[in-house]
Image (spheres, rainbow, N blue to C red):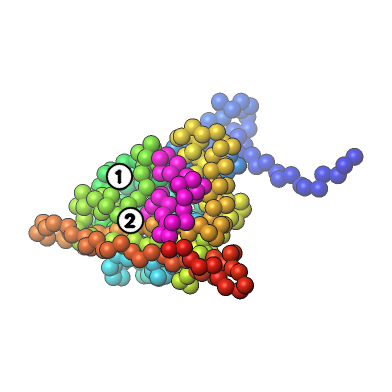
Amino acid sequence: MAQHSAQQEVIEVDPAVLANRHLNDYAASGTASLSSSVNSYILENGRRYSTYFGMDRNPLPVDELEQDRLDMHHETMLQLLDHKLYLAPIENPKTIIDIGTGTGIWAIDMADTFPDSEVIGVDLSPIQPEWVPPNCKFEVDDAEEEWPYPDNYFDFVHLRNITQGITDWPKLMAEVYRCTKPGGWVELAELGAIAKCDDGTMDDDNPMKIYFEHLDKALKVMGRPAGNPETMAARLQEAGFVNLGWDEKKQPIGPWPKDPRLKNIGAMVMLNTESGGTPGFHSYGMAVFTRVLGLHTDYADQLCAGAFNAAKNKNNHIYNMFYVCYGRKPEENEEPKEAKGKEKEEPTEPLQADKDDERDGAVDGEAKEEEQ
């Protein structure tokens, strides 16, 4: 008889099933406790998704692959912002909240940066570590519901990469405004869902371009379009925030840029799509492609794999945008005035590809001349 070398993982029993052993049917045993129910998940397309607040609340997975991806992308975004955790002009905040904290890595870094502050990270799923700085804590909650915090409580409110999980932005921003102290700041940060290219190396049939087009369409169908600075600034201004400021950064997908810093960022982005088998593209794409667009699982998987292969192709010089927008809550009795953001700058300079990566056609030791 053939030997089965892999030891099967023990299936853990739901604590709700173990409770009330005198009952022998599922219906009579009641529901699970909060501590176990917040860990409610489903397996779909080989990934684990949280279901505690509903199937459609967050279309991104919460498994270990995703947690690793989130931590690496945090480092990528830090490098995009010149190793800054935020751009808002805050000074010694005492109360900080991070909405959509994910693994909690940003909240932990802020707690270390401001050891005298209280830092709260809020997420739909309890995937944060247990060992954290003493001034940092995590809560499982739905940010689109009424917040359990008093008025004028936080010096700084941070919301990063949550647009795919938010349907009612006016309601969310009303709670943000209510809970922010007069003079306090709020910062929104989001990735764009449009593939861009400065040198013509992305054709219309490029698999990554097609992937992003499907992603952008799915988010719009959900009523959760990807971020852009105009929309983000409008959300802040309509909520009542003033002194708006914003910035945008190009996030290269692959180590093709000439600039060493951007080359390193691009390498991290590509690695983040690769580890464990295309988790980056799968994380954002699989659930919305199948649930929202109704695509067959195999075709959705092909879209994700195609984008990954395009990222590995050094002849594709593609990037997407990372946007940051922030605003201040007016002081009490401050005279109303028009909120003005930073003047829109001229288009950012095209990213230059590293010519060392374009020498496939070199003849007699000379690099192929770049097409104009």
Q: Reply above or below: 148 against 82.
A: above
Q: Reply yes or no: does residue 97 show up in magenta.
A: no
Q: Along the line of sight, which residue is nearer the eye, 268 or 320?
A: 320
Residue at 39%, 57% (x, y): give it: 321
Per the model, the C-alpha gap separating discs 2 and 1 is 12 Å
Determine the image quadrant of residue 3: top right
Quadrant showing the C terminus: bottom left
Residue type indicated by callout 2: Leu
Residue at 43%, 52% (x, y): give it: 195
Residue type indicated by callout 1: Trp
Residue at 40%, 40% (x, y): give it: 217
Q: On the rendered structure, is 17 left or right of 184? A: right
Residue 146 image offset from top left, x and y in percent? 31, 44
Secondary structure at badge 1 equals helix
Q: Which residue is mark 1?
A: 169
Quadrant showing the N terminus: top right
Q: Along the line of sight, which residue is nearer the eye, 240 or 254?
A: 254
Q: Which mark is residue 188?
A: 2
Q: On the rendered structure, is 31 left or right of 139? A: right
Q: Residues within 10 Å of mark 2 (few under 14, many from 20)?
A: many
Q: Reply above or below: 185 against 163.
A: below
Looking at the image, the residue that sits furthest to the front is 364
Per the rendered image, the range of residues in magenta is: 190-218
Residue 85 image offset from top left, x and y in percent? 39, 66
Q: Residues within 10 Å of mark 1 (few under 14, many from 20)?
A: some
Determine the image quadrant of residue 54: top left
Looking at the image, the residue that sits furthest to the left is 335
Q: Label 1 near label 2: C-beta < 8 Å?
A: no
Residue 78 image offset from top left, x and y in percent? 43, 66
Secondary structure at badge 2 equals strand
Examine the rendering and report whether any part of residue 92 can be seen: yes
Residue 124 image offset from top left, x and y in percent? 44, 46
